[in-house]
Image (tube, rainbow, N blue to C red):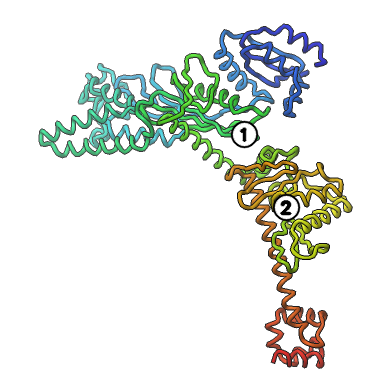
Amino acid sequence: MSNPSIELQLQTLPNNPGVYQFYDKDGKILYVGKAKNLKKRVSSYFQKTHEYGKTRVLVKKIVHIKHIVVPTETDALLLENNLIKKHQPRYNVMLKDDKSYPWICIKNERFPRIFSTRKLIKDGSEYYGPYTSMKTVKTLLELIKGLYPLRTCNYDLSRDKINAGKYKVCLEYHLGNCKGPCENYQTEEEYNSQIAAIREIIKGNFKDSLHRFKERMKEFAAEMKFEEAQKIKEKIEVLENYQSKSTVVNPKISNVDVFSIVSDESYGYVNFLQLSYGSIIRAHTIEIKKKLDETDKKLLELAITELRQRFHSKSNEIYVPFEVEAEEAIKVTIPKLGDKKRILELSERNAKFYRLERFKQVKITDPDRHTNRIMAQMKKDLRLQEEPRHIECFDNSNIQGTNPVAACVVFKNGKPSKKDYRHFNIKTVDGPDDFASMEEVVHRRYRRLLEEGESLPQLIVIDGGKGQLSSALKSLETLGLRGEIAIIGIAKRLEEIYYPEDPIPLYLDKKSETLKIIQQLRNEAHRFGITFHRNKRSKAAINTELEYIEGIGKKTAEDLLKKFKSVKRIKEASMDSLIEVVGPSKAQKIYAAFH
């Protein structure tokens, strides 16, 4: 660390929890972070060499450090989140959310109305939410409307106005959707008992309403009021159907937030489930763009704070996949077994599905971002020094003693570049010797690229195990390219990835995109090589059949095939048409041979 100004600033930092802010020479905020110990955490930026390039760049730009001391780590967590959202520093992950989410409002009035809104008015009304989907809100409101008759008018139903007979019941009353509190046909006590039941349903507690409806159904049935009993039965079925769709876990799991994360080189995807009375009352996934190679732990901590604030969560327990720092009042549970573990797994599945959906969308809307993500992932998975933007794959597994050939296929930015594919006839090897053939082909390919000044690949994939890889490596060594180009072998049976001088193979996740691209490369090289091999064999067979005729050489056979396209047509050709191509003498010999 050579900046004396920074050294002085570090010396004055306290050993307390707090939030730090880095600024550049123009006074622009670069980064906001939290720390248990400000002095230790901030000093660590300047005392070690950072592997990740962007962190090195950030540290070089820092000219001024500000800090805010807070009483607890929880306060640091909340303050960090708020400052990131307020300033959106360049090197912090993005936590911006411009969405206005819908809420369910129980209006603060006599005979309260219940409706959806995106505006929160501080008039004493109750708001439940926010919900991540308007569909969920509509489904809940339709459920409530079907179960309980509530008013929809916006009249001021004060006692004085009702007693003065100011209002008359409307069509909703006659349709049975409202019990007419505007004309005193329904008491305030009865109406409020409905509102209390609706509150519980919105929270996810269906037990009380179901019990009440079942009791009323029995009462109607005992009084021989079967029509009314049937109506109540239909309401019970509606409620039970809704409950069966929303209940996924043990009803004892209540008032809990569940968080999980999946990530790749560029993005993290955090899923949030909120549980009440065993039902999922909220589900939401956010995508977080990485800026400084943040760990899953760091991303999850930021997301937990953000999502709980965004959705006004009051839950005092969270389920997470690993240990995280959270607010002091929150109980952090890492489920290992049973229903708790299953709900965490459900959250992880949601995050994975969301990630896959985003991949599909991005592939169409932003192909460059899609390519960049795959390249970054391949670099990490295959332990490469640079992204494999240009990959070449060799295959000579189709050599079967005759017509030995090999194929080289080329992928650029993860996609086949067919104009760059090349076939090779094996020249220096007699018989089916895969290792020697691989050595020859790799040598010829890269000698030519070097001679012509063409760009070299970042990765070579050899279709085969250790032996094939060693042969290819010999050629690279001869050309002085060993260490200049990364090279791996892929063995067929178990999809093992071999590295030079490493006896232990790498096993990639069977579902990983990296393995899929390598398999696609290998399959394409095999297809390309086999096609060439077959064509060569077919041509050899055709030529042999024609050249077998005495007096007919290779040139005559080629002229005939050019004209008639196949041996079958040559056999069926008339004497006159044969004379046109090869003259009377040869035509007679050919005609005689086939007739």
Q: Is residue 259 left or right of residue 548?
A: left
Which numbered tag is attached to residue 134? none
Amino acid beneath label 2: Cys
Asked if 25 appears above or below 455 in the picture, the reply is above
Q: Nearer the viewer, residue 327 or 50?
A: 50
Left-right relation of 411 to 125: right
The front one of 590 and 577 is 590
Label ID, residue 393 = 2
Mark 2 neighbour class, 10 Å CA radius: few under 14, some 14 to 19, many 20 or more = many
- Residue type at numbered disc 1: Tyr
Mark 1 residue crowding within 10 angstroms, few (<14) / some (14–19) / many (20+): some
* Spatial CA span between label 1 and label 2: 29 Å
Secondary structure of the residue carrying numbered label 1: strand
Q: Quadrant of the N terminus?
A: top right
Tell me if I can see residue 232 in this picture: yes
| Residue 282 x %, y % | 44, 30
Depth check: 156 or 218 in front? 218
Residue at coordinates 47% horizontally, 17% vertically from top-left? 330
Report whether 359 appears left or right of 534.
left
Picture coordinates of residue 183, whole percent (x, y):
22, 25
Foreground mark, 1 or 2, reads: 2
Which residue is found at the position 81% from the left and 79% from the top? 554
Query: Which quadrant of the rendered structure holds the C terminus?
Result: bottom right
Which of 58/260 is in front? 260
Give above or below for 273 relative to 476: above
Percent x, y of residue 180:
24, 28
Disc 1 to disc 2: CB gap under 8 Å: no
User: Mark 1 sits on what residue?
Assistant: 267
| Rendered view: 570 above or below 518 | below
Count of marks, rendered view: 2
Quadrant of the rendered structure where residue 24 is?
top right
